[in-house]
Image (cartoon, helix red, strand yellow):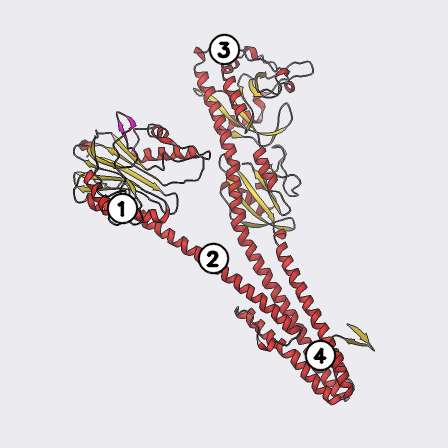
């Protein structure tokens, strides 16, 4: 804008004044007033529109970012917590094994010849070796504990050498002696080459395990010799109610340290708190929380910030929802997940202000667009002003009417635009380009910018709505399919409360929302119980549909009173007659004659059943026929199983022996038999729980790739009735 003779050129008010300059004073005054109000209205409309658009952009960006954070930060935190917890699980397993070996060896001490364990030798530095240490005034060579437990030196050395989670392991004894396995011997000797006294029973790992009475984890503590900070897992060794000592292992935290350090970036980081609410791992220079030794670290559950204290308490107990917490003068997103093995928790924190950077960039870009549009508008109106001034100088009257015309032409589309924008903000109706906005000047440019932004907003909302609707539909259908499938199989136990001749229990856990495994049992008549265990090829919804068809056909054939082999023959013929999808199902079926305990069975390509006779489960390697649905006209061979009172029958699908751990190793039938024989005298429900527990321990949280279905029958005989 420029000033000439005290008048500002470039503003709408001054344009109107210049337009009517030279016209009668009254006309100039009236038109000036009109121009003033029109200028104010135009300014207010543009400013209000800018503010409303910026508010809409801010709200949309904030809502979108909150949804992204809720989905990604919580999931990532749970995954990182699970990964870190797996490291501790391996250490707990090793310490428990060392505890068991020590207790077992001490029980056999009368039949074990003591061995000699040498003092620290600097020549062994860099090599995993065993050494004897002791408290002040205690001679380790006279310790009965050291002599007997020295036999564990080889397995303890192997434990340290073969583990990437353990830097040292040891057993401290109640007589003040200590059997240690690590890589460094020289730091345990003084300047004269004599062993430095080691206060075994005063160390935190020793006292913590004794107080806990089981597995115990220290906070961050300094190593007694090197001074390096570490975390120790320990467990008491108790024989016949007497404390012999404490077994422990120092934990290598490299993988967890990498997770924590890699989590740190310009917007946030992750840290770990122990069961005392103390920070044990955190990135350096994270400006909020720092890891300190256990004697100095603050219990965050007692923090003066009540929100932080409550969040840490919640994270130690369960996976938390995403929360926004104020720390200092800033807001942060927090998500936490527990580490059950050590009762610690991993917490992720993200600076909320940093997540708003895209919003600020968008607003800045929007501001630039507005500024450019305003600049073009001012340049265009400036040229118009000069032209109008020349016309006014030629003829005042024509200029007066021209000024009114131009003012209306400028203001009218803006007023209409303002009206449409207000309607849009009040009703949600999107702004649309109209012919009245096509003024071939900056007003049209501004209208096109609003129209383009509105269309993009509409497409964004439509895409989000469509994706959300589709996701909800699929989720609802799968949930309903799961409920239908569960209702198709017996799931109320005991299923026959009035029948005491036998006890039966079964379970099915699909790998996905629905599965292809199924079991069934039903009374054909008062003296015959039909048992079915089946596995459909494939997974998911197709397998579930084929499973329900197969189950109905099997039960219908069985209720005709036919033998086990005839049931399979009829079922195979029925399925093959319309099996256009070429799916198949493996089936084991048997009919128990309740009065005699005799089972007549037939197998169509299914897993071998396991039978318990004389108190031990063994596999019954029966003759397999072709799978159901494989080929028309197949005949099946029957065989009999004589069940005595107390005998049990265990049926299962291949999801049990083929369960795999993270290293792709399978559980196998031998481990399954070991689980069955852990407590073969237990009731059927406990038998299934024992197998499932061993499978879970083996896979260590690895993803379940196949359905797991089991059934156990215990025959009690007529006397049981």
- Marks 4 and 1, Cα distance to the nearest angstrom? 84 Å
Q: Quadrant of residue 434?
A: bottom right
In the rendered image, residue 289, in percent from the top left (x then y), is placed at 63, 41
Residue placed at 75% from the left, 88% from the top?
Answer: 396
Check residue 42 for magenta coloring: no
Identify the element where label 2 is drawn: helix
Return the residue found at the far right. 5
Of the numbered discs in the image, which one, if any, rests on residue 550?
1
- Which residue is the site of mark 3? 114
- Marks 4 and 2, Cα distance to the nearest angstrom? 50 Å
Does residue 242 appear anywhere in the picture? no
- Marks 3 and 2, Cα distance to the nearest angstrom? 72 Å
Identify the element where label 4 is drawn: helix
Q: Earlier in the sequence, mark 3 or mark 1?
A: 3
- Marks 3 and 1, Cα distance to the nearest angstrom? 66 Å
Does residue 675 appear anywhere in the picture? yes
Q: Earlier in the sequence, mark 3 or mark 2?
A: 3
Is 318 positioned to the left or the right of 308 in the image?
left
Task: Give the magenta part as a residue range.
Answer: 607-620
């Amino acid at each position: 804008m420029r000033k000439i003779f005290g008048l500002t050129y470039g503003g709408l008010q001054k344009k109107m004044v210049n337009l009517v300059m030279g016209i009668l004073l009254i006309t100039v005054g009236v038109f000036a007033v009109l121009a003033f109000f029109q200028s104010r209205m135009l300014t207010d409309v543009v400013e209000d529109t800018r503010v409303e658009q910026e508010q809409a952009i801010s709200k949309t960006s904030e809502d979108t970012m909150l949804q992204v954070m809720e989905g990604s930060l919580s999931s990532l935190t749970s995954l990182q917590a699970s990964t870190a917890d797996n490291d501790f699980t391996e250490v707990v397993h090793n310490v428990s094994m060392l505890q068991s070996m020590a207790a077992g060896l001490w029980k056999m001490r009368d039949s074990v010849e003591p061995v000699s364990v040498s003092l620290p030798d600097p020549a062994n530095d860099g090599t995993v070796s065993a050494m004897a240490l002791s408290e002040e005034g205690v001679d380790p060579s006279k310790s009965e504990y050291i002599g007997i437990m020295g036999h564990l030196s080889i397995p303890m050395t192997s434990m340290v050498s073969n583990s990437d989670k353990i830097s040292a392991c040891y057993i401290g004894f109640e007589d003040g002696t200590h059997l240690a396995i690590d890589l460094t011997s020289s730091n345990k000797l003084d300047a004269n080459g004599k062993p430095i006294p080691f206060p075994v029973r005063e160390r935190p790992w020793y006292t913590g395990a004794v107080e806990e009475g089981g597995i115990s984890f220290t906070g961050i503590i300094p190593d007694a010799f090197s001074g390096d900070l570490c975390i120790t897992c320990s467990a008491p060794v108790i024989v016949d109610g007497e404390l012999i000592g404490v077994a422990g292992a120092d934990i290598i935290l490299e993988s967890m340290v990498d997770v924590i350090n890699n989590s740190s970036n310009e917007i946030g980081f992750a840290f770990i708190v122990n069961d005392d609410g103390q920070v044990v791992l955190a990135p350096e220079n994270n400006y909020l929380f720092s890891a300190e030794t256990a004697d100095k670290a603050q219990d965050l559950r007692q923090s003066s910030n009540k929100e932080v204290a409550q969040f840490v308490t919640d994270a130690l107990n369960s996976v938390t929802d995403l929360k926004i917490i104020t720390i200092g003068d800033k807001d942060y997103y927090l998500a936490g997940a527990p580490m059950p093995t050590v009762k610690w928790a991993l917490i992720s924190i993200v600076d909320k202000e940093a997540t708003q950077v895209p919003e600020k960039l968008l607003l800045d870009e929007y501001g630039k667009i507005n500024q450019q549009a305003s600049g073009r508008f001012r340049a265009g109106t400036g040229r118009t002003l000069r032209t109008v001034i020349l016309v006014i100088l030629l003829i005042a009257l024509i200029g007066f009417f021209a000024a009114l015309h131009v003012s209306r032409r400028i203001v009218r589309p803006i007023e209409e635009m303002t009206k449409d924008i207000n309607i849009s903000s009040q009703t949600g109706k999107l702004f649309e380009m109209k012919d009245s906005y096509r003024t071939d000047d900056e007003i049209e440019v501004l209208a096109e910018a609003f129209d383009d932004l509105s269309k993009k907003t509409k497409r964004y909302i439509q895409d989000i709505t469509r994706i959300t609707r589709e996701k909800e539909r699929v989720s609802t259908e799968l949930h309903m399919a799961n409920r239908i499938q569960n209702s198709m199989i017996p799931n109320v136990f005991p299923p026959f409360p009035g029948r005491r001749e036998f006890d039966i229990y079964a379970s099915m856990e699909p790998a996905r929302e629905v599965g292809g495994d199924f079991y069934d049992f039903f009374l054909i008549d008062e003296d015959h119980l039909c048992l079915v265990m089946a596995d459909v090829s494939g997974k998911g919804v197709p397998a579930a549909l084929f499973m329900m068809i197969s189950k109905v056909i099997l039960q219908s054939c069985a209720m005709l009173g036919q033998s086990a082999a005839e049931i399979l023959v009829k079922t195979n013929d029925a399925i093959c007659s319309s099996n256009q999808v070429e799916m198949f199902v493996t089936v084991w079926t048997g009919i128990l004659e309740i009065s005699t305990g005799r089972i007549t069975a037939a197998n169509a390509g299914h897993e071998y059943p396991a039978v318990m006779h004389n108190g031990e489960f063994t596999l019954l390697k029966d003759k397999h026929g072709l799978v159901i649905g494989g080929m028309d006209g197949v005949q099946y061979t029957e065989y009999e199983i004589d069940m005595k009172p107390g005998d049990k029958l265990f049926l299962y699908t291949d999801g049990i022996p083929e369960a795999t751990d993270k290293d792709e190793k399978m559980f196998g039938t031998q481990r399954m038999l070991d689980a069955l024989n852990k407590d073969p005298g237990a009731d059927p429900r406990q038998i299934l729980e024992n197998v499932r527990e061993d499978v879970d321990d083996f896979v260590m949280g690895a993803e379940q790739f196949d359905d797991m279905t089991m059934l156990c029958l215990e025959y009690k005989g007529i006397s049981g009735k």
